[in-house]
Image (cartoon, helix red, strand yellow):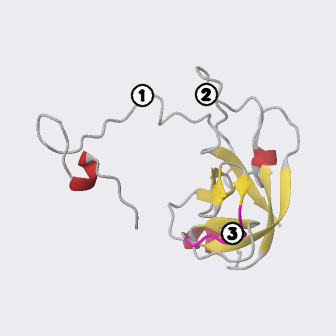
Amino acid sequence: GFHLDVPPRRRVWATPNGKANFLPLPGLEVNDPVDDPQMLRLSTIRSHDQFNTTIYSYNDRYRGIHGDRMVLFMNAGDIAARGLADGQAVALETISRDGRPRRVAGLTVVAYPMPSGSVAGYYPELNPLMPLDYHDHITGTPAAKSVPVRIAT
């Protein structure tokens, strides 16, 4: 493959302790409170064969998906707790304060090793679930990594 000769590739960090240092940014733990026991946090993601919103194929070798993008990645425990099954068709609805219904149907549940309480799906397919007012308060960037949603069958 093609490799860039950059210091981190050689595991070299120009820090006082010579190691990579990670610092949590203030505000990353902040999510609007949601009073719904069925609430999950949606992250929209890209597939391997995608650059921004340009989709080159319906395959995602990162996650073992072939021929489909209408999938919902879920924790196996969350699937069981909701009485769902891997491969089941579901819809996803946004939980938002504005009362406007946002729904994407025709998603296939895919069991995937991820944190409980989280789900993920491809964008732009799941963009209709993101409220326009759900964004970073400083930059205005859409908050596409923690959208409160619920499963609808």
CA gap, disc 2 and disc 1: 13 Å
Q: Secondary structure at mark 2?
A: loop
Q: Is residue 137 above or below residue 93?
A: above
Give the residue at x 17% y 45%.
Answer: 19
User: What type is the residue that disc 2 sits on?
Assistant: Asp
Name the spot of residue 149 as percent of width and height, x first. Answer: 72, 50
> Quick one: which residue is furthest to the left in this view?
17
Q: Secondary structure at mark 1?
A: loop
Q: Quadrant of the N terminus?
A: bottom left
Q: Secondary structure at mark 3?
A: loop
Dots 2, 1 in contact, CB < 8 A: no
Q: Quadrant of residue 110?
A: bottom right
User: What type is the residue that disc 1 sits on?
Assistant: Pro
Q: Which residue is mark 1?
A: 26
Specify few, some or many for label 1: CA neighbours under 10 Å numbering under 14, 14-19, or 20 or more.
few
Give the residue at x 77% y 66%.
Answer: 70
Q: Which residue is mark 3?
A: 82
Image depth: mark 3 or mark 2 in front: 2
Q: Give residue 136's mark.
A: 2
Q: Quadrant of residue 73?
A: bottom right
Q: Which span is picked out in magenta?
A: 56-61
CA gap, disc 3 and disc 2: 31 Å
Name the spot of residue 35 as percent of width and height, x first. Answer: 68, 42
Q: Is residue 60 magenta?
A: yes
Name the spot of residue 69 as percent of width and height, x first. Answer: 74, 66
Along the line of sight, which residue is nearer the eye, 130 or 32?
130
